[in-house]
Image (cartoon, rainbow, N blue to C red):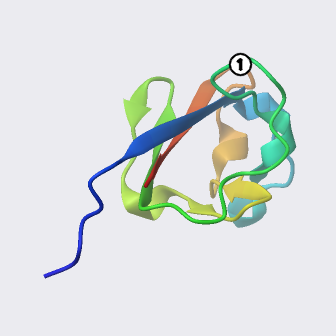
Amino acid sequence: MPIVTPYQNSLRFASTIGAGTGTGAAFAVAATAFTDDSGAAATAFPGTFNYYNLYVNGMLQTADTSTISTTAITIPDGDALNDGTPIVVQFVVS
């Protein structure tokens, strides 16, 4: 059984699809295109986290919809969405 830490918190980052670059499988939105919970520009995503959730237009997405690094989130075929579509990435950290 995995050890669960007693303290967990979440960090949220918001942007829009229009901030992304690339096409098809290479479509990605840089971490610097997001704002954090305080409204400040993000510099990077957390390097360690328990898991993350991706919300596109307020809808929670399945795990196969994206991949993430400290510098960007890749959303294959995200370029097919409207530029104004909001995206929120929530990291659960301990």
Q: Where residue 44 sits in the image (x, y, percent)? A: 79, 50
Q: Quarter-wise, where is residue 63 in the image?
A: bottom left
Q: Residues within 10 Å of mark 1 (few under 14, many from 20)?
A: few
Say which quadrant the C terminus sits in. Answer: bottom left
Residue 26 sits in quarter: bottom right
Above or below residue 66? Residue 56 is: above
Residue at 76% in and 53% down:
28
- Relative vertical location of residue 58 with respect to residue 25 in this rendering, above or below: above
Number of callouts in the render? 1
Give the residue at the far left of this rendering: 1
Q: Residue at x 46, y 39 (%)?
A: 10
**Residue 23 left/right relative to 75:** right
* Residue wearing tag 1: 84
Quadrant occupied by the N terminus: bottom left
Q: Residue 16: where, in percent of width, then height?
A: 71, 27
Which residue shows up at 68% across the image and 25% down it?
82
Outermost residue on the bottom side: it is 1
Name the amino acid type tagged 1: Gly
Give the image location of residue 89, x and y in percent: 56, 40
Report the side of 4 relative to 77 (left or right).
left
